[in-house]
Image (spheres, grey):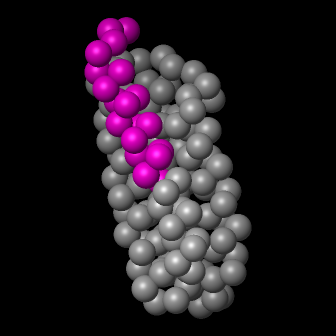
Amino acid sequence: MHKFKDLKVWQKSRVLSKEIYFLTNSFPKEELYGNTSQIRRCVVSIPSNIAEGAGKNSNPEFNRFLDIANGSASELETLLILSNDIGLLSNNDLTMLVSQLTEIQKMRYSLKNAVLNTKI
């Protein structure tokens, strides 16, 4: 079992979640049950799956949850790009968020490799 709160990737994905929550507050109210809701579910899924995987008793299970977190990150990036395409998200905000997301994905990849090479 890993201490998820000590994982930098969990910490950074939590910060990203907070930033996205604040940014999506400016989305139109008619998007609340569309883009806003879907984006928020995706971003929260990243640290949630990292934490859930860290709480499992085996590295293969942890890796499975790291893969789920990665899928959520890819979905999130798509939704952010689409939000930019339709004018809900500025180019500057998109660039900043995708940069943070890319860093998180790289960290998740490194963690996955470390977990694969460790026996517990």
Residue 110's spot in the image, x, y percent?
A: 37, 31
Q: Is residue 104 above or below residue 31?
A: above
Q: Nearer the viewer, residue 46 or 58?
A: 46
Q: In which quadrant of the rendered view does residue 108 lie?
A: top left
Q: Nearer the viewer, residue 107 or 75?
A: 107
Q: In which quadrant of the rendered view does residue 10 lie?
A: top right
Q: Report the span colored magenta.
A: 101-120
Q: Residue at x 56, y 29 (%)?
A: 7
Residue 96's spot in the image, x, y percent?
A: 56, 63
Tell me if residue 64 can be seen.
yes
118 within the magenta span: yes
Query: Would residue 58 be found to the left or right of residue 19 on screen?
Result: left
Q: Residue at x 31, y 26 (%)?
A: 113
Main SS of the magenta part reads helix
Query: Would residue 28 be found to the left or right of residue 1 on screen?
Result: right
Q: Residue at x 41, y 64 (%)?
A: 77
Q: Residue at x 57, y 73 (%)?
A: 92
Q: Is residue 94 above or below residue 69?
A: below
Query: Would residue 56 be found to the left or right of residue 44 on screen?
Result: left
Residue 103's spot in the image, x, y percent?
A: 47, 46
